[in-house]
Each structure stands twice: as C-alpha cells, then as structure tokens.
Amino acid sequence: MKYSKLFPKSQKIEFKEDLSVNAKYLVKGGFMNQLMAGSWTLLPLGFVVVEKIKNIVREELNKTGAQELLMPLLHPREIWDTTGRWSDPEVQKIMYQFKDIHDKEYGLSFTHEEIVMNLLGKFVQSYRDLPVMVYHFSTKFRNEPRAKSGILRAREFMMKDLYSAHVSEEDMYEYYNLVKEVYVKIFERIGLSVIVTEASGGVFTKNVTHEFQVLSDSGEDEIIYCPEGDFSQNVEIAKVKEGKQCDLGHGPLKRAKVIEVGNIFPLGTKYSKDQKVFYTDKDGSQKEIWFASYGIGPTRVMGALVEVHHDDKGIIWPKTVAPFQAHLLVVSSQKSVVRTADDIYTKLEASGVEVLYDDRDVSAGEKFATADLLGIPHRLVMSEKTGDKIEFKKRNEDKTELLQFDELIKRLKEETEG
C-alpha cells in the first residue's frame, strides 16, 4: 500500500480534552474516528488490526472444536422474557429497548445467551447432539452512561461470543477450563500478558466467573493479586486486602488497575430451565443442558494493546497484529533514489511482505514522525546515504542496520515467524 493512496492520512491534532492514550494515538494515526460519544468508525488501518486479532481468536477457537456462525442483533422482547432478563433493572440500564411502528418491543443485542439456547431448542434432541460449541463475531450495543477511554468503553463495539452446551456439569467445566487455557494462549499471540482473575457474574450468572485482565494504569477495573503466583480476584469480590501475605509464600498481595480484555462464564442450567430446553439422555429421561459463555472484545483488545505498547512518539504494535510488517520510507528528492525505492517496494510486495510505502513529497522529519506514530514493527529507509542497501530498524529499538535486499527479506521472515 502506498501511503499517498491510504485513506485517511495521520492527523496533526491538538486535543482539547484529556484523552486516553489509545484514543489519542488511534485517532491521530488514522485507525479510528469518532461519530459520537461511544461510537467509533474503524478506518482501514484499524480494520486490518482488528481482523488480525479476530483471525488469531478464530484459529485457536476452531482447534477446540468450536464452529463459527452469525446471529441476529435485533431481538424480540419475548425471547428475553423467557429468562426474565428483559425486565431486570440491571439489564434495562445497559440494553437498548424500543418499540417499532406496530408497538412491538425489541432490543439491541449486548449478549446472545437467550438466542443460542433458543437455537439449541430447535436442533438438540438427544445426548448424541451434545456438546455444541458455537461462536460469532458481531457488533454489541451497551447503553454506557460514561462512554469514555477511547475504544475501551464504548456504546457500540465488536465482540466475539462463544457458547458451549453440555450434558453435565463435569463436561461443561472440562471445556470451560480448556477455553481458559486457550484464552491465555490467544492473548499471548496477540501481544498481551493477562492475569486470570476471579470475578462476579454480573447480569449473566451468580456463579464465580473469570476475567482476563491486563495491568495498566489507565484501567478502570482493580484487582488484588499475587505477582508471583496464580491468585487474582476483582476487588468487587475480593475477601483479602492488599498487603496480605500470599498463602504460597510468594510475598504480599498487591492491588492494581487493569483493563479487562476477556471473560468466561459457567452459566449452569439456568437458561435451559428458564427456556425449557432439554435433551433426552441415554436412559430416556429429559435432562437440562449445562451452558457456558466466553467473550473477547477485538476492538477493546486493540485499545488495550495501544495502552500497553506505546511510547511518547506513538504506537508500538506487536508483530502479530500490526497493520503492516514493514514501513518503507524514501527520504530523498533525487529521482534515482526514488526510482530505486519504487523498485524495492514492488519487490517487497512480490515477496509477500505486507508493506506500507511512504511515497509522499514531504520532509524526512514528517515521514519519521508518521512512522513512529503508526507503530509498524519494522522501518525501512532509503536515501542517498544508504546507496544500494536499505536501512533496517525495529520500532521498539534504536539500533539501525544496512542490509542488502536478500538479507532484508530473510530478516523480515525471521522477525515475522520468530
């Protein structure tokens, strides 16, 4: 992609309000744009990042036997009445509910438990039909009273919902614990170190659930955790305080701000009972379905990545989710150098390298500033000084190297696959 053709370009903006880091850099870099409070357009660069996040999630979930589908976002009141959640004051605080011209009531989805259980009721008859693991990526709507922190707290956002249905509690927890491990792997691949944290089930369940939290001073959640162990609880349910000695001898517990990037809920049989969806067991008896749900917000993950991976110049994308592998800059007005850079760009694309080529007629300083802001992992520079070589630099390092084209391709392959 040539930068001159990219829509839109990065912007030089002086923000009047004190914005979160992710909002500041994602807006200035041209990754997203605000329509109104809590509602964002994913621009082409941001769309690529989110798609790469989704693909990692998709790859790992498919390995667990889960299958992808797509469910409606517009829900009739009747299906939510089966569980009583339509009239739940806590649900009404966050769910957009309205009437159409025929006075029929609908809601915009913030979750899909009722819809999945309704689907199971149509297709699951026997124990032979279970387990079922299905997921989708879709837009969610939440009536956030304080839509802020950029893309971290929005009224409209992308979400991955996975749902699993089982014949028994044991089977449910076996898959639940598998997904817990898979989530940690997903976030590692994306570039986030998460702390698995016990939490409340909120409007979903009264059972103990698990959140996947990322340490960050910009986070709105807080946890009590052991930095050297595997204990962590959301402060909302924590029964211990900061400073208490870890039971495993790892030192004092700490309190920290965090960003929630994922959650998993063992829902049990509530939805099966409420919606009267049962299966026939081996002995011919009717039994309730054990149910669980699992969420990851790809757009929220993108915001969390920026909060964690940045410096005072801009974003530092992990290589697995960066919009491009390499950012090629030509910093010369000499036609021969520009022609050589054009040729290198063509060769990079032919070699399968995802490359953004800054071909604009602007100063070297502006090009370097743009490269730092966008945060693409590898910067490639061509100028009179580089001759027939290309200057190679990682976004998160100061060191530069001069490489021949073949050496560059080898290095990029090593960096991308390593």
Image (cartoon, rainbow, N blue to C red):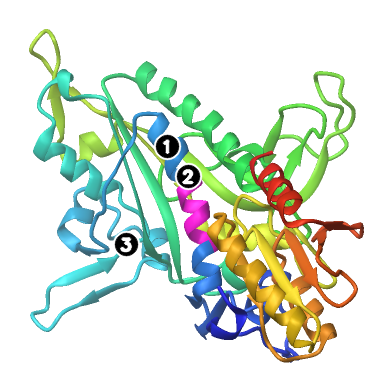
Real-space Cα distance between discs 3 and 2?
A: 21 Å
Q: Which quadrant of the structure image shows residue 185?
A: top right
Please name the amino acid that badge 1 sits on.
Answer: Leu
* Residue drawn at the location 58% of the way across and 77% of the way down: 2
Residue 82 at least partly seen: yes
* Residue drawn at the location 72% of the way across and 66% of the way down: 375
The mark that comes first in sequence, 1 or 3, is 1
Asked if residue 181 lies in the magenta stretch, the reply is no
Label 1 vs label 3, nearer the camera: 1
Real-space Cα distance between discs 1 and 2?
A: 6 Å
Residue 295, horizontal then vertical, whole percent: 45, 47
Residue 36, horizontal then vertical, whole percent: 50, 85
Q: Name the residue under label 2.
A: 57
Front residue of 254/174: it is 174
Residue 149 at least partly seen: no
Q: Is residue 411 above or below residue 358?
A: above
Please name the amino acid that badge 3 sits on.
Answer: Ser
The mark that comes first in sequence, 3 or 2, is 2
Please name the amino acid that badge 2 sits on.
Answer: Val
The answer to whether the residue labelled 1 contacts the one labelled 3, judged by CB atoms less than 8 Å apart, is no
Q: Examine the residues drawn in magenta and state their main secondary structure.
A: helix
Q: Name the residue under label 1.
A: 61
The answer to whether the residue labelled 1 contacts the one labelled 2, judged by CB atoms less than 8 Å apart, is yes
Q: Is residue 232 above or below residue 368?
A: above
Circle 2 sits in a helix, a strand or a loop, which is it? helix
Q: Give the range drawn in magenta.
A: 49-56
Front residue of 30/249: it is 30
* Residue drawn at the location 52% of the way across and 34% of the way down: 208
Residue 129, horizontal then vertical, whole percent: 17, 24
Q: Mark 3 points at which residue?
A: 109
Residue 321, horizontal then vertical, whole percent: 59, 55
Q: Residues within 10 Å of mark 1 (few under 14, many from 20)?
A: many
